[in-house]
Amino acid sequence: RGLRMSRNQIIGIIVPDITNEYFAKLIQVVQNTLFGFDYPVAIYNTNESRDIESKCLRYVRAQDVSGVIYINGDPSLEEGQLDGIPTIYVDREPEKRPRIKTKYVSSDNRAGGYLAASELIRAGCRRVAVMTERAGTYVMSERLAGYAAALEEAGLTVEKELVFRPKAITYEAAYETVTEALEEGVEFDGLFCQTDWLASGAIAALQSRGMKVPAAVRIVGFDNISISHMCSLPFTTVKQDIDAIGAYLANTMIDMIYDRDESGVVQVFPVNLIRRRTT
């Protein structure tokens, strides 16, 4: 079949961090579904490095894969290397989307940011901080826009000192960032963390300073990974539907390969709030 199609019967998956639980679970769903179609996967982990990601794109092209699922990649690196290959971009749109056999799939990140901030406001918060990444990727920017919309709707403003930008999207960086904010006297009674690991680090930093959550500060995370509920203080978070997204990626990829796909170019999946003890 590969000879007839001039493609190897393999689906390439490019992922920024395979140790990230959200990505790992998503790939597991994709892989299990594709196995049902007799399509194995080749996973390329970029470790969030531009140099490695650029090499992965060249490897994918050289291997003549049947299709590519490109998760949270850097759109400026592609430079047409995937032209002609059925490609689904996840969470980041390409800067110049090819005209055929491409799709863009994402959760409704703007709605997620809105839900998170609205939950904190509902719980009585009036100085609502947000922790996001420094790079300002599309996904994080959308979540930030949703946060800002909720504040505006409530008659609140986005204050520069309440936008925390840690060095990395990690527990340790979140802990350090919140500790520094507290030492500088920044006052906030609510904090929207744009990933669950950031939320976990923020909670630990607050507790180390003797500040009780949610009495002193209410917290909302994003992703609903294991750490959000398998910890001493289960925290409120925004859930992405990993099973639905993964199944869609796999099934749509097969339809694209065999020219059976008739769905739209953009597919956005709804998110929902999971309320726990931190709000």
Image (cartoon, helix red, strand yellow):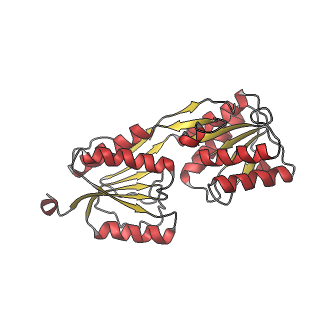
Question: Dividing the image into 4 quarters, which one contains the N terminus?
Answer: bottom left
**Count of all numbered marks drawn on residues in the image:** 0
User: Residue 165 at x, y = what percent?
Assistant: 70, 55
User: Residue 173 at x, y = what percent?
Assistant: 68, 56
Give the left or right position of residue 196, taking residue 203 as reference.
left
User: Residue 3 at x, y = what percent?
Assistant: 13, 63
The residue lying toward the viewer, choosing from 96 and 208, is 208
Give the left or right position of residue 53, taking residue 237 as reference.
left
Q: Residue, x 54% and y 49% (percent of image)? A: 139
Residue at far front of view:
232
Residue at far right of view:
185
Where on the picture, by quarter, is residue 166? Answer: bottom right
47 vs 211: above or below: below
The residue lying toward the viewer, choosing from 10 and 103, is 10
Q: Residue, x 68% and y 48% (percent of image)? A: 201
156 vs 201: above or below: above
Question: Dividing the image into 4 quarters, which one contains the C terminus?
Answer: top right
Give the left or right position of residue 232, taking residue 105 as reference.
right
The residue lying toward the viewer, choosing from 175 and 129, is 175
Q: Residue, x 61% and y 33% (percent of image)? A: 115
User: Residue 131 at x, y = what percent?
Assistant: 68, 48
Is residue 159 at least partly visible in the picture? no
Give the left or right position of residue 32, taking residue 52 as reference.
left
Where on the picture, by quarter, is residue 261? Answer: top left
272 vs 259: above or below: above
Is residue 77 at least partly visible in the picture? yes
